[in-house]
Amino acid sequence: GEDVEQSLFLSVREGDSSVINCTYTDSSSTYLYWYKQEPGAGLQLLTYIFSNMDMKQDQRLTVLLNKKDKHLSLRIADTQTGDSAIYFCAESTQAGTALIFGKGTTLSVSS
Amino acid sequence: KAGVTQTPRYLIKTRGQQVTLSCSPISGHRSVSWYQQTPGQGLQFLFEYFSETQRNKGNFPGRFSGRQFSNSRSEMNVSTLELGDSALYLCASSLEPENTEAFFGQGTRLTVV
């Protein structure tokens, strides 16, 4: 079945760039998402990209999609301590529903 | 504008009991989805409702059910609770089913003892 995989941990220093990687198996995935979850909170949608796009930039966030390799990455520029959270990659063949999530990458930012 | 509201925030139930969780979507949002989050399985899609109809269903046993009311509020029910049902249950709302932006509530933490 469909699967989404992410590395579990990433540790960076404040001010550095963070790159969180994700791979997925479903070649019919049309929508790819990045969500952020802070302790005790729900999921916050950060950004999404359609499968016909290679890149999307939104302020400090850059999403890169390599559809051939089924690889998605999220780059956070000038990482801040407030960016410390769990980041989830998700994919769907239908917009906004039946999302398949990765296990999440815990980003730790040290000052 | 109020976000997605889930009640209660925390719940403790005994094995064999049943439980009902509630989700009020963002005003104007008509599509509601439910997800289960556990440390072992991560986030898994339960079901989606739109216009009081279930549009989509994940791979969960029939003990898990839901419904949506005419005001778009949704409830999910779990019958004959098992220890493994202990999880954070998250609700997400979006304007329409085909809308890419789903907004999540803070979740209901269910503990089954």
Image (cartoon, coloured by chain):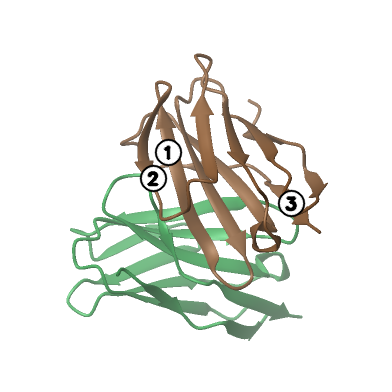
Chain colours: A green, B brown
Q: Considering only vertical position in the picture, is A105 above or below B56? A: below
Q: Quadrant of residue B21?
A: top right
Q: Considering only vertical position in the picture, is A56 above or below A110? A: above
For marks 3 and 1 on the same chain, the one whose residue lies earlier in the sequence: 1
Of the residues shown, which amino acid type is indicated by label 3? Answer: Arg
Of the residues shown, which amino acid type is indicated by label 1? Answer: Glu
Q: Give coordinates of residue B4: x percent, y percent.
A: 62, 34
Question: Disc 3 marks which residue?
Answer: B109
Look at the image and tell me in which quarter the N terminus of chain B lies. top right
- Mark 2 is surrounded, within 10 Å at the Cα level, by few (under 14), some (14 to 19) or many (20 or more) other residues, namely some
Cα–Cα span, label 2 and label 3: 21 Å
Residue closest to the far top = B70
- Mark 3 is surrounded, within 10 Å at the Cα level, by few (under 14), some (14 to 19) or many (20 or more) other residues, namely many
Q: Give coordinates of residue B88: x percent, y percent.
A: 67, 54
Q: Chain of mark 3?
A: B
For marks 1 and 2 on the same chain, the one whose residue lies earlier in the sequence: 1
Question: Disc 2 marks which residue?
Answer: B57
Q: Secondary structure at mark 2?
A: strand
Same chain, labels 1 and 2: yes
Q: Quadrant of residue B87?
A: bottom right
Q: Give coordinates of residue B54: x percent, y percent.
A: 39, 32
Q: Chain of mark 2?
A: B
From the viewer's perspective, is B67 left or right of B19?
left
For marks 2 and 3 on the same chain, the one whose residue lies earlier in the sequence: 2
Question: Disc 1 marks which residue?
Answer: B48
- Mark 1 is surrounded, within 10 Å at the Cα level, by few (under 14), some (14 to 19) or many (20 or more) other residues, namely many
Q: Nearer the viewer, mark 1 or mark 2?
A: 2
